[in-house]
């Protein structure tokens, strides 16, 4: 793949993550669709940095009536590049959905260039290295062999297994401290150093914020994208200005 490069003086670059879209949350879906049809139309690129959906058990189980893929495809046809990265909830998203959405799947971590700055993008769960149980689970479900075996199951069995896994995950999280579920500072510094970047953008932790790190003689910034539960969250890069913005959720349709 050729280097991914954008100039925000020409058009804005957008980053979002952790929308966790689900039919039970129509407000989030309505807000996202509205954003795609309005503000995103002005952007050169939209990076979706994992967990677009609450759950994903395979492209073949995606409901044909769902409005998300057509809305993304319309944005892509308008001229905005759409980059789609896996999260911890939708790591089984494949090429079939990406094609339907007019998007390009982006392996993580991805090193891109914006305004001449080296930027690293990833979902963020791999940086939570203090959560050893989760990292073991992550290694298992990201294994191609495990994924092929799971996707070969009937959809009903996949649904049942996914629901059981979400229940276990909720129980596990209840017993973990906030520190364990956050990124590890040393892991963040090592990632930035290994990839020689000045900016790191990630989601996953649902703790939006901007953090400045001092690495030897240099400094770097870490931008944490927020979730879309109580509001929307978008990192907008426009004419060199980096702004983490919140969006009010649109009231439930009807």
Image (tube, rainbow, N blue to C red):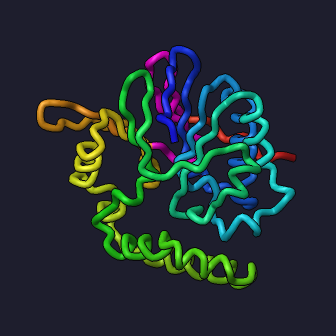
Above or below, 141 relative to 108: below
Foreground: 238 or 249? 238
Q: Where is residue 230 in the image (x, y as percent from the top left)?
A: 59, 47
Q: Where is residue 88 in the image (x, y as percent from the top left)?
A: 51, 63
Foreground: 119 or 23? 119
Q: In this view, does 72 lie to the left or right of 168?
A: right
Residue at screen point 51% across, 20% down: 8
Above or below, 211 relative to 230: above
Above or below, 107 relative to 76: below
Residue found at the very far front of the displayed protein: 2
Residue found at the very far left of the displayed protein: 216
Residue at screen point 44% across, 36% down: 112
Residue 174 appears in which quarter of the rendering? bottom left
Query: Number of labelled discs?
Result: 0
Residue at screen point 68% across, 48% down: 28
Residue 147 appears in which quarter of the rendering? bottom right
Residue 188 highlighted magenta (yes or no)? no
Q: Is residue 55 left or right of residue 131?
A: right
Residue 82 appears in which quarter of the rendering? top right
Foreground: 95 or 197? 95
Above or below, 223 relative to 206: above
Look at the image and give the residue range highlighted in magenta. Answer: 225-245
Q: Position of residue 220 (x, y in %)?
A: 27, 34
Residue at screen point 76% across, 68% down: 60
Asked if residue 70 shows in the view, the reply is yes
Foreground: 211 or 80? 80
Asked if residue 209 shows in the view, the reply is no
């Amino acid at each position: 793949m050729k280097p991914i490069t954008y100039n925000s003086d020409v058009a804005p670059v957008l980053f979002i993550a952790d929308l966790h879209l689900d039919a039970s949350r129509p407000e989030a879906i309505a807000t996202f669709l509205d954003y795609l049809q309005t503000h995103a139309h002005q952007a050169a690129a939209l990076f979706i940095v994992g967990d677009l959906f609450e759950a994903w058990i395979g492209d073949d189980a995606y409901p044909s009536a769902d409005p998300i893929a057509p809305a993304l495809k319309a944005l892509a046809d308008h001229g905005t590049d759409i980059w789609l990265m896996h999260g911890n909830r939708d790591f089984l998203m494949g090429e079939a959905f990406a094609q339907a959405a007019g998007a390009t799947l982006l392996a993580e971590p991805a090193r891109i260039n914006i305004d001449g700055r080296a930027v690293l993008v990833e979902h963020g769960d791999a940086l939570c290295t203090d959560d050893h149980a989760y990292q073991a689970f992550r290694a298992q479900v990201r294994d191609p062999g495990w994924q092929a075996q799971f996707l070969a199951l009937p959809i009903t069995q996949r649904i049942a297994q996914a629901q059981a896994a979400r229940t276990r995950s909720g129980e596990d999280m209840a017993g973990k401290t906030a520190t364990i579920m956050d990124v590890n500072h040393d892991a963040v510094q090592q990632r930035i150093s290994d990839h020689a970047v000045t900016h790191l953008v990630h989601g996953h932790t649902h703790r939006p914020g901007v953090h400045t790190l001092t690495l030897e003689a240099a400094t770097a910034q870490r931008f944490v994208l927020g979730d879309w539960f109580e509001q929307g969250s978008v990192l907008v890069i426009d004419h060199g200005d980096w702004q983490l913005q919140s969006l009010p959720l649109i009231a439930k349709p009807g």
